[in-house]
């Protein structure tokens, strides 16, 4: 048996539902909507009666309803409102720019060109903008330094969590253009591409939440990016006691000296070009045990070496694969170019046995350089938080499609990257609170459509019925954990 019931909600509205009862127990409820006025209540009751009559019309085709219902438009209003709330909770609304806000939200939902973002905005139920407003927003973002304001808001968001550790890494974004310019230049590409590119330096906290983003010319050495980024971060926020974590690509003696002189502590990966003396001395007397640590003290820092059996097994498998390739090249089965263990001279080629032995001796060993006075194990744990930067870069490149395909001058590219930075912050914040990726979050919430329904000539907003899975995720967002 089905019947219509009215239920008072906690907000004071009246929810209209169709309840199905079997043997005196309600076993199914369909939510029609919530009304705040008597007129809305009458319309929702009419809709509920219409739904009940659908089955009756099959049994009694001569019964006709006098209610005329049509859907004027539908939109993903719940997703728009949720992302808008996250945008404002992070303090980005201090920009006072609704166009920038809309561009940021559409970048999260469906990354596309600025012009096509108008279509995404319409699907989300956002305010329509003239296309020229979008381009004027990019000019404002550059001229008014929106990036600095966004970075400050990000810093304010995490500073209450006692910010003492920041992670830094770089990536590259390429451009499908023939001619380079002063900004987009060929260089060492993370994606092994030959096109002109720019370098992106990203600073995040230990959870991968972005704190700052900087771009550099495509041919700039990675080691020369870390100091400008750290100095700008220090200048903006007045910080001195903060630890920087970076991988081995950022390592140079000049960088370490400069960081030390500026009062920073650091943890940096160490490139192992040869077997360290302390390790070789130990290896003379026996094998290293799993997770064993050997420390080498230097004048202003120390190098921590750790051996891991699992890493050694992987390293040795890779070494044997490379040796097998070198042997195939030696016998003429495959081309002999760019093989690690094959030495090629003018008239001969041979297996580099000494290089193979060195690689085997280094299998499973990783080095970490630090001037921090904390236990060795903590240094290693902090360094391995760098995966958070990699995760944030992956979100930027895949989910947010950060590569500025449609922009041609530096001003527009920098404005685009500022939108990406804000979208990254929202995405990482949602991921940390809900436990699901931003991609899956959008996939879960976007199908929950609101609709403008016309009933007998009167319009009413019909809100979506929210399934339990979506309710759970949205409750985590609203509660903050």
Image (cartoon, rainbow, N blue to C red):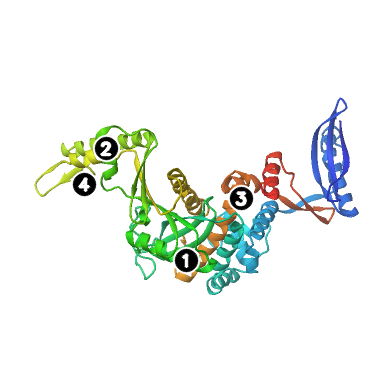
Q: Earlier in the sequence, mark 4 or mark 2?
A: 4
Comparing 326 with 29, the one in front is 326
Tell me where residue 403 appears, x and y as whole percent: 46, 58
Q: Residues within 10 Å of mark 1 (few under 14, many from 20)?
A: some
Q: Which residue is mark 3?
A: 430
For marks 1 and 2, give the CA distance: 47 Å
SS at mark 4 in the image: loop
Q: Earlier in the sequence, mark 1 or mark 2?
A: 2
For marks 4 and 2, give the CA distance: 22 Å
SS at mark 1 in the image: loop
Which of the 4 image quadrants contains residue 339?
top left
Q: Which mark is residue 407?
A: 1
Q: Please say if 131 is above or below 188.
A: below
Q: Residues within 10 Å of mark 2 (few under 14, many from 20)?
A: some
Whether residues under marks 3 and 1 lie with C-beta atoms below 8 angstroms apart, the answer is no
Q: Which residue is mark 4?
A: 337
Tell me where residue 294 appears, x and y as whole percent: 35, 42
Whether residues under marks 4 and 3 lie with C-beta atoms below 8 angstroms apart, the answer is no
Q: Earlier in the sequence, mark 2 or mark 3?
A: 2
Q: Residues within 10 Å of mark 3 (few under 14, many from 20)?
A: many
For marks 2 and 3, give the CA distance: 43 Å
Marks 1 and 4: which is nearer the front? 4
Q: Please say if 239 is above or below 37.
A: below
Marks 4 and 2: which is nearer the front? 2
Residue 97 visible in the current orientation: no
For marks 4 and 3, give the CA distance: 47 Å
Whether residues under marks 1 and 2 lie with C-beta atoms below 8 angstroms apart, the answer is no
SS at mark 3 in the image: helix
Comparing 283 with 462, the one in front is 283
Whether residues under marks 4 and 2 lie with C-beta atoms below 8 angstroms apart, the answer is no
């Amino acid at each position: 048996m089905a019947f219509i019931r009215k239920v008072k909600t906690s907000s004071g509205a009246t929810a209209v539902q169709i309840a199905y009862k079997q043997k005196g127990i309600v076993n199914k409820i369909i939510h029609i909507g919530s009304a705040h006025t008597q007129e809305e209540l009458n319309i929702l009751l009419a809709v509920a009666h219409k739904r009940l009559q659908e089955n009756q019309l099959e049994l009694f085709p001569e019964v006709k309803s006098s209610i005329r219902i049509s859907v004027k438009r539908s939109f993903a209003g719940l997703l728009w409102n949720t992302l808008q709330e996250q945008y404002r909770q992070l303090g980005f609304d201090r920009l006072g720019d609704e166009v920038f806000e809309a561009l940021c939200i559409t970048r999260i939902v469906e990354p596309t060109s600025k012009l096509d973002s108008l279509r995404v905005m319409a699907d989300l139920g956002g305010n329509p903008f003239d296309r020229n407003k979008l381009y004027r927003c990019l000019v404002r973002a550059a001229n008014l330094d929106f990036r600095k304001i966004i970075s400050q808001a990000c810093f304010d968001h995490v500073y209450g969590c006692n910010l003492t550790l920041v992670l830094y890494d770089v990536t590259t974004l390429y451009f499908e253009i023939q001619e380079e310019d002063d900004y987009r230049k060929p260089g060492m590409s993370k994606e092994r591409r030959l096109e002109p590119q720019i370098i992106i330096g990203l600073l995040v906290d230990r959870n991968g939440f972005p704190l700052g983003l900087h771009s550099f010319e495509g041919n700039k050495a990675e080691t020369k990016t870390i100091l400008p980024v750290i100095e700008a971060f220090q200048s903006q926020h007045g910080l001195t006691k903060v630890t920087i974590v970076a991988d081995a690509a950022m390592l140079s003696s000049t960088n370490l000296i400069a960081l030390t002189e500026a009062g920073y502590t650091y943890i940096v990966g160490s490139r192992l070009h040869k077997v360290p003396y302390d390790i070789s001395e130990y290896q003379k007397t026996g094998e290293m045990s799993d997770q064993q640590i050997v420390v080498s003290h230097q004048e202003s820092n120390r190098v921590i070496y750790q051996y891991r059996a699992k890493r050694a097994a992987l390293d040795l498998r890779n070494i044997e694969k490379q040796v097998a390739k070198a042997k195939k090249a030696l016998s003429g089965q495959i081309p002999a170019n760019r093989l690690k263990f094959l030495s090629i001279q003018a008239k001969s080629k041979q297996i580099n046995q000494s290089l193979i032995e060195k690689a085997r001796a280094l299998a499973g060993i990783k080095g970490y350089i630090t001037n921090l006075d904390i236990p060795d194990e903590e240094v290693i744990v902090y360094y391995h938080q760098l995966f958070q930067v990699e995760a944030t870069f992956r979100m930027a490149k895949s989910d947010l499609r950060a590569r500025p395909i449609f922009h041609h001058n530096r001003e527009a590219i920098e404005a685009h990257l500022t939108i990406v930075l804000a979208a990254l912050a929202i995405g990482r914040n949602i991921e940390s609170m809900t436990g699901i990726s931003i991609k899956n979050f959008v996939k879960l919430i976007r199908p929950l459509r609101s609709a403008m329904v016309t009933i007998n000539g009167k319009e009413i907003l019909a809100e979506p019925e929210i399934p339990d899975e979506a309710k759970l995720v949205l409750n985590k967002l609203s509660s903050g954990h």
